């Protein structure tokens, strides 16, 4: 009986050096991934907040000029340290009768490893007639 106990204890040694190296490599890859991707999602949260600030600014979006909207968004970006070019260069304003749709669609490319890049696509829309649905792409009933 004692020989069986000794044999089972001998097999329960834990991870070896190679297994620990593999665990550390996998953990390191996921940490690298997180350090590259999380700031981009945080930056997109600021883009969403900038669009929401247009609604809560007091002025009606329909009454603002395109230059005023762009200036307010760019000021918000500057204050909140939005550095990438995507949100600043991809502001599109479409106007219809008593309606304005502000679109900030952009993609960001970040190098992950040697020749592997991550491409993240963000779509942010603000329809002045539906301000509660801010930052979700506009869907038309005709396209469904």
Image (spheres, helix red, strand yellow):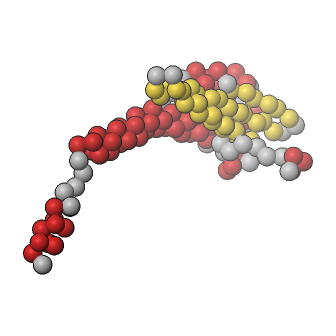
Tell me residue 137's x, y (percent): 72, 42
Where in the figure is residue 58, as x and y percent of width and height?
64, 39
Q: Residue 21's spot in the image, x, y percent?
A: 28, 40
Which residue is at a point 20% across and 61% down the rendered structure image? 12
In this rendering, does residue 73 appear at all? no
> Left of 111 or right of it: where is 47?
right
- Between residue 53 and residue 26, name the one nearer to us: 26
Residue drawn at (11%, 72%) of the image? 3
- Looking at the image, which residue is at 79% across and 46% down? 139
> Which residue is rendered at x = 58% and y = 27% of the image?
108
Figure quadrant of the N terminus: bottom left
Task: Give the quarter of the image for residue 2.
Answer: bottom left
In the picture provided, is 49 more to the left or to the right than 89? left
The residue at the far left in this view is 2
Above or below, comparing residue 11 to residue 102 in the picture: below
Is 101 on the left-hand or right-hand side of 17? right
- Measured along the vertical axis of the image, is residue 83 above or below residue 33? above
Can residue 13 be spotted in the picture?
yes
Nearer to me, 84 or 13 = 13
Q: Is residue 107 left or right of residue 76?
A: right
């Amino acid at each position: 009986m004692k020989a069986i106990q000794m044999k089972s204890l001998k097999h329960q040694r834990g991870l070896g050096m190679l297994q620990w190296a593999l665990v550390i490599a996998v953990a390191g890859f996921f940490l690298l991934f997180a350090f590259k991707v999380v700031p981009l999602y945080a930056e997109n949260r600021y883009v969403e907040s900038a669009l929401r600030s247009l609604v809560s600014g007091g002025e009606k979006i329909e009454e603002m000029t395109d230059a005023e909207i762009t200036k307010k968004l760019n000021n918000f970006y500057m204050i909140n340290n939005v550095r990438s070019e995507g949100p600043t260069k991809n502001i599109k304003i479409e106007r219809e009768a008593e309606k304005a749709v502000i679109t900030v669609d952009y993609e960001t490319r970040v190098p992950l490893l040697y020749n592997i890049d991550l491409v993240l696509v963000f779509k942010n829309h603000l329809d002045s007639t539906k301000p509660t649905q801010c930052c979700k792409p506009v869907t038309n009933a005709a396209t469904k």
